[in-house]
Image (spheres, rainbow, N blue to C red):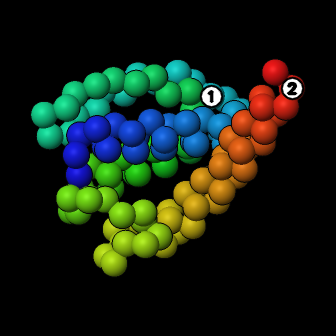
Amino acid sequence: MKTEKFKSEVNTLKTFLEIYCCNKHKNKTAVEKNIRYKELKFSTTLYLCDECLSMFEYSLEKLQNCPHDEKPRCRQCSNPCYEKPQWKKLAKIMRYSGIKLGLLKLKNKFFY
């Protein structure tokens, strides 16, 4: 996977987890994560609870070890690397956050 795609995937994951965590959990903390992928190094600040931070770290590990040059969507992957419980949990988070993002875009389009 190209480094630009990796960084985009990490930012998408971060956004979706933060939306979900903000609406569903309490006790969030700010955590600075230094991330490496091939020659790319960057840091990001996450505002997540321990449970969501754990999911971010699990997903980040899977992204870093993705064997595909052109990364497919995980649900379309011929060789999925996520364990079933984590995959279901992340799918739930993505669904919830995707709906929230879609509603926010609609709200901004009509009311601003």
Q: Give residue 34's position: percent from left, percent from top.
A: 30, 27
The total number of labels drawn is 2
Q: Give residue 27's position: percent from left, percent from top.
A: 66, 29
The amino acid on which the numbered mark 1 sits, given as a three-letter code, is Lys
| Label 2, label 1: how far apart the Cα atoms are | 30 Å
- Disc 2 to disc 1: CB gap under 8 Å: no
Question: Residue shown at 33%/23% (left/top)?
Answer: 43
Q: Quadrant of residue 6?
A: top left
Q: Residue furthest left?
A: 39
Element at badge 1? loop
Which callout, 2 or 1, points at the residue further toward the start of the chain?
A: 1
Q: Give residue 92's position: percent from left, percent from top.
A: 64, 59
Question: Residue shown at 32%/44% (left/top)?
Answer: 5
Question: Residue shown at 34%/68% (left/top)?
Answer: 81
Q: Is residue 80 above or below residue 90?
A: below
Element at badge 2? helix
Query: How busy is the neighbourhood of tag 2: few (under 14 within 10 Å), some, or many (20 plus)?
Result: few
Q: Which residue is mark 1?
A: 28
Give 30 or 109, whichever is nearer the viewer: 109
Give 16 or 53, whichever is nearer the viewer: 16
Give 66 or 1, whichever is nearer the viewer: 1
Nearest-to-viewer mark from 2 and 1: 2
Q: Which residue is mark 2?
A: 111
**In this orientation, does residue 83 appear?**
no
**In this orientation, does residue 85 appear?**
yes
Give 32 or 104, whichever is nearer the viewer: 104
Residue 43 relative to residue 40: left or right: right
Question: Residue shown at 42%/65% (left/top)?
Answer: 74
